[in-house]
């Protein structure tokens, strides 16, 4: 394909999680020579054998093809990866500390590694989500630890991919943000991204870092906003699905992220909202709106647990069937998944949990105890006093409801994602409770 000849750059990627692996694979697919590294030896050994460390639609085929065509390789040797690329992407994790601030030790460790091993000009790009001023910190760490007199530039290129559509999002992003104060680095980044469609915005490093946090904070706020509306709908007898639809036709608002439910989870919104509150505090700004976003999100899970308790009265010894564990569909990611909080709360009162998720059960087994993991939705429903919907996987939208009804001890479904039509559920003979709609049909 002729676009392969356009890029053809040497790229290094450090960290092969959701972001690093997607980035490495897509740049390889676009014709670049990519070497990706991770300190997790098991991950790298697996990748070298074609075993994916994560579930992401379309990823495996692309990895296997690019490895076969020798555009993509994996190593656990950070020296080798630092030597390889003209551009080095830092894609390591930035988890939250207990205080909510961003843990930067993985980014800092990579910066030190780069300082110790750099021997020619490199563009060092941080893709991980980091507080504003991290680019300057990375630069300082490298300057203080560098062994040879060598030139380099630091660029912020925040990642906006969504798990579940990571490949698509990386291939065709809405926008590409490049934060740099170096014309040379900007030109190199422009050359790399020339093969990718998407509006490019070049800014200073701090603005690029802020764009990522501001975007995630805005989206999380949109989710909390519609969840607050759902709560008012329940009190007033309105239907949040209709309200969201009516709001969404407004071009200034749009429908996306107006899905009422049990709140946001995953590795981005919960930690990034908390981190942004802390960052704002450090600059002397009390970001009350974002605090409310976080509080509403926390409460939304509690409200759901209350719905279950109100309906079942005593949940001691009750069997609770659960469909969906991942924080959203099309991923196996369990990090900050609302299902974890909900299951633990129900277990506190000795409920017996049976659960099914199409992709996330292996990861869920590492986090949850005393859960009976099932082979399909029907096994999860069998003999259960209630069936909960916690993730809106497509396969749950097309169940055989007659079969589900015959398997359940009570024909009761409590839906945390509003995936069913209440009238249809009534026709199927279920008692159906959802979010922000008429309390029960
Ligand atoms: P992840 O935990 O899936 O992957 C991080 C990887 O970095 C791990 O495999 C880990 O072993 C590796 N690593 C840690 N230290 C290392 C080191 N010193 N050398 C080499 N490898 C090292 O994380 P992720 O979900 O890919 O997220 C990475 C960053 O991107 C985070 O800052 C996150 O906030 C941001 N981000 C994530 C998403 C998402 O949807 N997951 C989207 C946009 C941005």
Image (spheres, grey):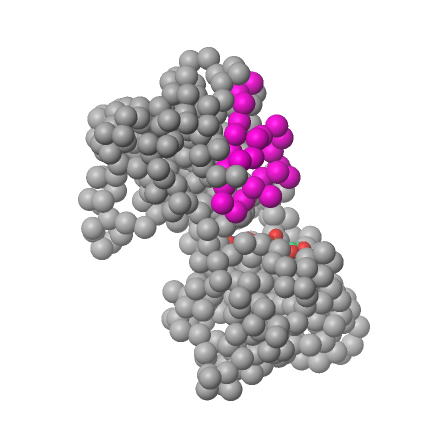
Q: Nearer the viewer, residue 91 or 182?
A: 91
Q: Nearer the viewer, residue 14 or 395?
A: 395
Magenta span contains residue 392? no
Residue occupying the point 51% across, 33% down: 355
Residue occupying the point 62% across, 72% down: 67
User: Where does the image place residue 17, in percent across and percent down from the top left?
Assistant: 60, 57
User: Where does the image place residue 101, in percent across and percent down from the top left?
Assistant: 59, 44
Vertical order, 303 against 264 (above or below): above
**Residue 13 in sight in this render:** yes
Give the magenta-colored segment's residue range: 349-374
Vertical order, 390 against 133 (above or below): above
**Residue 38 in sight in this render:** no
Q: Quadrant of residue 145?
A: bottom right
Residue occupying the point 38% across, 20% down: 410
Residue 258 vs residue 16: left or right? left
Magenta span contains residue 350? yes
Residue occupying the point 50% across, 50% down: 331
Could you tell me which quadrant the C terminus lies in? top left
């Amino acid at each position: 394909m002729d676009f392969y000849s356009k890029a053809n750059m040497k790229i290094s990627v450090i960290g092969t999680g959701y972001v690093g692996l997607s980035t490495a694979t897509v740049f390889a697919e676009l014709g670049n020579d990519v070497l990706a590294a991770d300190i997790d030896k098991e991950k790298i050994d697996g990748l070298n054998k074609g075993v994916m460390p994560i579930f992401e639609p379309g990823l495996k085929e692309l990895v296997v093809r690019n490895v076969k065509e020798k555009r993509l390789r994996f190593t656990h040797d950070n020296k080798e990866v630092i030597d390889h690329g003209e551009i080095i992407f830092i894609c390591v994790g930035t988890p939250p500390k207990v205080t909510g601030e961003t843990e930067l030790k993985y980014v800092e460790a990579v910066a030190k590694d780069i300082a110790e091993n750099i021997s020619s000009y490199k563009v060092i790009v941080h893709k991980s989500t980091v507080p504003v001023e991290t680019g300057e910190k990375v630069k300082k760490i490298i300057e203080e630890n560098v062994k040879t007199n060598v030139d380099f530039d630091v660029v912020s290129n925040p990642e906006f991919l969504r798990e579940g559509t990571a490949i698509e999002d990386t291939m065709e992003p809405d926008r590409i943000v490049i934060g740099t104060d170096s014309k040379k680095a900007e030109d190199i980044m422009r050359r790399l991204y020339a093969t990718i469609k998407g509006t490019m915005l070049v800014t200073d490093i701090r603005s690029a870092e802020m764009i990522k946090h501001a975007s995630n904070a805005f989206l999380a706020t949109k989710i909390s906003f519609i969840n607050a509306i759902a709560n008012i709908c329940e009190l007033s007898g309105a239907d949040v699905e209709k309200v969201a639809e009516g709001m969404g036709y407004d071009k200034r608002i749009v429908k996306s992220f107006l899905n009422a439910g049990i709140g946001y989870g995953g590795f981005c919104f919960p930690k990034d909202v908390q981190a942004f509150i802390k960052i704002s505090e450090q600059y002397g700004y009390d970001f009350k709106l974002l605090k409310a976003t976080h509080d509403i999100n926390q409460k939304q899970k509690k409200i759901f647990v209350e719905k279950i308790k109100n309906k079942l009265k005593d949940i001691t010894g009750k069997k609770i069937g659960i469909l969906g564990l991942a924080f959203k569909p099309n991923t196996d990611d369990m990090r900050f998944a609302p299902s974890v909080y909900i299951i633990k709360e129900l277990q506190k009162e000795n409920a017996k949990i049976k659960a099914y998720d199409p992709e996330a059960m292996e990861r869920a087994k590492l986090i949850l105890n005393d859960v009976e993991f099932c082979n399909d939705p029907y096994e999860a429903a069998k003999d259960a006093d209630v069936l909960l919907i916690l993730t809106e996987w497509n396969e749950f939208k097309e169940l055989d409801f007659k079969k589900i009804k015959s398997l359940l001890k009570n024909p009761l479904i409590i839906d945390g994602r509003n995936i069913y039509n209440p009238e249809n559920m009534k026709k199927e003979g279920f008692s159906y409770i959802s979010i922000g709609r008429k309390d029960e049909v």
